[in-house]
Image: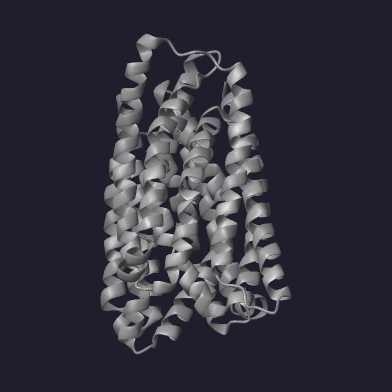
């Protein structure tokens, strides 16, 4: 039994990690290419779209992907073959929401750019970005189904295809514009993002069509119950993600504004923001390919074992995860602290990026651990606890943005990142420890 339970996690983690590392490697080289093609200010403008993209994903897909994954995993534990009903139900809600979001972003691009992002140059980019929302919703829901049945190869392949087509599109279009003697716009990068989502959606849709031949049918009498379960899981997750992303959006938009209060002009504040979020942070998140792969597959495995009452397996899996993710974080911290300055200058041609990488290296032990702990807590049905803890840490970070950045510049924000990740790690560990102790006492 033990081998059977561990096998999908090990194999799935290997597949997702291999694809994740290759994807992040391509993405890392892509970031270097973008930074040299569009400069620090261009990267800052591009990064302003991140809150919009995250908020759109939270509203239309994130909660449904997780709910589909959990429901399919629970069905797989009691059926010979999983049913596709959770996927169709999730898509039936997620797709209309994403199309509505697509329309709002497209037709309201000007006011969103001017009043929310405070950068009029993002309006044309928002229109292009809007078409990626329904594409992302479809392939995210389908990925949730494959994560639930522990077939990590499809999401991994889609992830890799998305990155390759994104980079290829930008390289071809920007090369064509340069050959005409013109400077390409940063909108080219957004076009690449949408193109990548399109090809990823096509691949996952083809895969689930083939999978439909091997899936079992769901009895009509259980459809109503299943729909209730899906909404009961997805709606709180969606609400939580929306609130969290609203706070993160406030944070992202406020950083350049508070840097102006520190004394920077508009170009400098966008450049500093672009170096931090477009160069240094992707570099720090590069090793997260492994922990993200573990986190994605931990959720259905923890959910399945918790539903079956296998608390000893849950406890051992949790301890093993904490041990290895913590060790990996400490090793990465040492590498980034020692080599961060060199990496920023040699790879990005930016000493400022080197300073950010070196400073952010100290969050690695908690950053990588928090990713997997969050997934374990979700698998145990503690999404509400996760929400409260994340809100606390985001408010802490916002406090640094509004109070420390105007006085100490971007260094004040780095202090906030360190403080919030440390706090989140302690809260996650405390919550998980109390829950496991309570469950072990019951048994």
**Nearer to the camera, 18 or 261:** 261
On the image, the x and y values in percent for residue 235 come to 30, 37
Q: Quarter of the image containing the C terminus?
A: top left
Q: Is residue 390 left or right of residue 155?
A: left
Q: Is residue 196 left or right of residue 66?
A: right
Question: Residue 367 at x, y = what percent?
Answer: 46, 58
Left or right placement of residue 440 versus residue 83 in this view: left
Q: Is residue 329 above or below residue 234?
A: below
Q: Quadrant of residue 28?
A: bottom right
Mark yes or no: residue 425 visible: no
Q: Quadrant of the N terminus?
A: top right
Residue 372, image x, y percentages: 47, 46
Tell which residue pokes out farthest to the right in this image. Answer: 179
Q: Residue at x 56, y 48 (%)?
A: 197
Nearest the eye: 176 or 330? 176
Percent across and percent down for residue 210 are: 64, 24
- For the residue pair 111 and 400, the one nearer the viewer reads as 111
Q: Does residue 29 sit above or below 338 in this rendering?
A: above
State the residue in front, 443 or 397: 397
**Which residue does the image show at 45% across and 59% down from the upper left?**
127
Colour scheme: one colour
Q: Is residue 233 above or below residue 108?
A: above
Number of marks present in the image shown: 0
Residue 329 seen in render: yes
Residue ID at (45%, 21%): 85
- The residue shown at (63%, 38%) is 203
Q: Is residue 430 left or right of residue 217?
A: left
């Amino acid at each position: 039994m033990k081998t059977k339970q561990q096998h999908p996690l090990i194999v799935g983690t290997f597949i997702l990690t291999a694809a994740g590392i290759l994807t992040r490697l391509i993405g890392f080289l892509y970031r270097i290419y973008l930074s040299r093609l569009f400069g620090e200010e261009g990267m800052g403008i591009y990064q302003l779209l991140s809150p919009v993209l995250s908020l759109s994903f939270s509203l239309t897909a994130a909660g449904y992907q997780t709910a589909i994954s959990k429901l399919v995993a629970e069905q797989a534990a009691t059926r010979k073959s999983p049913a596709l009903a959770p996927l169709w139900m999730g898509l039936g809600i997620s797709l209309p929401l994403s199309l509505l979001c697509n329309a709002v972003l497209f037709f309201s691009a000007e006011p969103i750019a001017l009043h929310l992002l405070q950068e009029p140059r993002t309006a044309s980019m928002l229109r292009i970005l809007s078409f990626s929302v329904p594409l992302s919703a479809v392939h995210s829901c389908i990925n949730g189904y494959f994560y639930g049945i522990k077939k990590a190869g499809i999401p991994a392949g889609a992830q890799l295809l998305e990155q390759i087509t994104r980079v290829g599109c930008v390289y071809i279009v920007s090369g064509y514009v340069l050959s005409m003697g013109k400077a390409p716009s940063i909108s080219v990068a957004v076009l690449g993002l949408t193109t990548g989502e399109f090809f990823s959606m096509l691949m996952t849709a083809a895969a689930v069509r083939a999978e439909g031949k091997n899936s079992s049918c769901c009895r009509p009498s259980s459809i109503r119950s299943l729909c209730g379960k899906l909404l009961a899981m997805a709606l709180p997750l969606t609400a939580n993600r929306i609130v969290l992303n609203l706070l993160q959006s406030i944070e992202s938009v406020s950083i350049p504004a508070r840097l102006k209060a520190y004394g920077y002009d508009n170009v400098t504040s966008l450049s500093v923001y672009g170096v931090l979020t477009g160069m240094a942070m992707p570099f720090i998140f590069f090793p997260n390919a492994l922990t993200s792969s573990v986190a994605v597959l931990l959720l259905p495995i923890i959910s399945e074992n918790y539903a079956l009452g296998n608390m000893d397996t849950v406890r051992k899996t949790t301890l093993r995860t904490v041990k290895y993710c913590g060790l990996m974080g400490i090793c990465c911290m040492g590498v980034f602290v020692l080599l961060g300055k060199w990496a920023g200058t040699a790879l990005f041609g930016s000493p400022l990026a080197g300073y950010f990488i070196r400073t952010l290296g100290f969050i690695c032990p908690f950053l990588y651990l928090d990713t997997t702990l969050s997934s374990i807590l979700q698998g145990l049905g503690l999404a509400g606890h996760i929400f409260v803890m994340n809100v606390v840490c985001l408010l802490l970070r916002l406090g640094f943005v509004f109070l420390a950045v105007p006085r100490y510049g971007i260094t004040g924000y780095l202090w906030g990142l360190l403080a919030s990740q440390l706090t989140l790690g302690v809260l996650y560990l405390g919550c998980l420890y109390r829950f496991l102790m309570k469950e072990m006492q019951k048994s």
